[in-house]
């Protein structure tokens, strides 16, 4: 398995252990990512299964938000968005779907930029493992509202696109795409932005969430022009690629996200040893995916502060 296949497989195994997926659902998702039902079964066999649904002790006191982080996680919804949901018709932004020319068939993307048309720094946005969803489009518009020319690239563009494939199929498609292709697609997205009169190609940053956080980390290692990166709870890149990082990195984590957080000491040490600009921010009582205001793990307080810290980082380094 490559770097991202392992991440995706481990994520679905974790959801199985937490009772968010049935064994059958987890097998299907992991097999779609790895291309092997045998490997998927082996991965799940090594997991501690969730309590049986027919065990009265496991269902006592259960609620629709079981497994979500304590605190404000239950307040999910657009009205509680960390920087306020920005509607597509907001007069301060121009937002549209775009086609990005490449040497391969064109990429699809979602573009948002300030309606004053003044040249703005670029922020590339990488989606989660469910693709370029309405939530990611909203995040892209939030950056435009904050003064950036933002582009989210649909990494399953050549497989029908996120909307055409459906959220349930996107992880398997992503698992079959080379990490090198993710990098190439985002570089094509950056070049496309550089040709636009409302964008400043030399001032470019990137953020991403979950799977997209991992892509953001890898872009920091592979794209020397990247000035700043804010990966949200994503797997760090191979440590032997850390010397290549030129961007200032502020990595965002949730305290309850043990699987991802286990990698913090290694990446922190590698960044320090290579004299890189790095800061890890860990939010108490926040879990994986806490920034997504459409999900059960949403934590409004942590998301609001993480958004502010993201804008602060880009303002400083872009």
Image: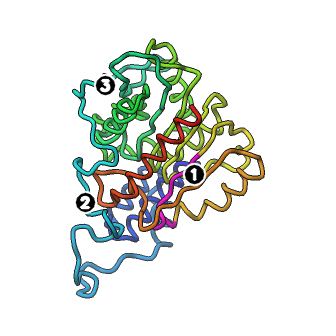
Q: What distance separates the C-alpha of mark 3 from that of mark 2?
A: 27 Å
Picture coordinates of residue 178 (x, y %)? 55, 38
Give the left or right position of residue 97, taking residue 271 as reference: left
State yes or no: discs 1 and 3 in contact (Cβ < 8 Å). no
Mark linked to residue 75: 2
Mark linked to residue 268: none
Q: Which residue is drawn at 35% across and 37% down?
A: 132
Picture coordinates of residue 128 (x, y %)? 41, 45
Q: Is residue 274 on the magenta stretch?
A: no
Is the residue 295 above or below the residue 198 in the image? below
**Kind of element beneath mark 2:** helix
Between 189 and 33, the one lying in front of the other is: 189
Q: Quadrant of residue 98?
A: top left
Mark linked to residue 1: 1
Numbered disc in front, either 1 or 2 = 2
Between 107 and 43, the one lying in front of the other is: 107
Q: Quadrant of residue 227?
A: top right
Is the residue 83 above or below the residue 100 in the image? below
Query: Mark 3, residues whose alpha carbon is within 10 Å: few (<14), some, or many (≥20)?
Result: many
**Which residues lie in the magenta part?**
250-258
Q: If the image is split into quadrants, where does the C terminus sit?
A: top right
Q: Which colour scheme is used?
A: rainbow
Numbered disc in front, either 1 or 3 = 3
**Kind of element beneath mark 1:** loop
Picture coordinates of residue 75 (x, y %)? 25, 60
State yes or no: discs 1 and 2 in contact (Cβ < 8 Å). no
Mark linked to residue 93: 3
């Amino acid at each position: 398995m490559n770097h991202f296949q392992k991440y995706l497989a481990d994520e679905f195994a974790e959801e199985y252990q937490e009772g968010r997926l049935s064994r059958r659902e987890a097998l299907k998702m992991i097999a779609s990512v790895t291309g092997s039902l045998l490997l998927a079964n082996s991965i799940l066999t090594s997991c501690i299964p969730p309590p049986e649904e027919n065990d009265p002790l496991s269902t006592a006191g259960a609620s629709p938000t079981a497994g979500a982080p304590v605190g404000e996680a239950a307040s999910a919804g657009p009205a509680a968005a960390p920087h306020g949901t920005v509607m597509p018709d907001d007069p301060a932004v121009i937002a549209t779907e775009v086609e990005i020319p490449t040497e391969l068939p064109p990429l699809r993307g979602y573009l948002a930029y300030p309606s004053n048309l003044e040249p703005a720094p670029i922020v590339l946005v990488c989606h989660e493992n469910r693709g370029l969803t309405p939530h990611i489009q909203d995040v892209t518009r939030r950056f435009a509202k904050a003064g950036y020319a933002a582009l989210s690239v649909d990494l399953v563009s050549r497989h029908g696109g996120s909307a055409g494939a459906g959220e349930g199929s996107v992880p398997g498609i992503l698992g079959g795409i080379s990490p090198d292709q993710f990098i190439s697609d985002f570089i094509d997205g950056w070049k496309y932005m550089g040709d636009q009169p409302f964008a400043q190609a030399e001032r470019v940053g990137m953020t991403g969430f979950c799977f997209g956080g991992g892509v953001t980390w890898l872009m920091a290692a592979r794209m020397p022009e990247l000035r700043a990166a804010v990966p949200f709870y994503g797997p760090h890149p191979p440590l032997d690629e850390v010397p290549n990082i030129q961007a200032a990195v502020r990595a965002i984590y949730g305290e309850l996200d043990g699987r991802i957080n286990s990698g913090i000491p290694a990446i922190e040490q590698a960044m320090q040893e290579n004299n890189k600009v790095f800061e890890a921010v860990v939010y108490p009582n926040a879990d994986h995916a806490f920034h997504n205001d459409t999900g059960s793990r949403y934590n409004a307080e942590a998301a609001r502060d993480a958004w502010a810290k993201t804008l602060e980082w880009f303002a400083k380094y872009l």
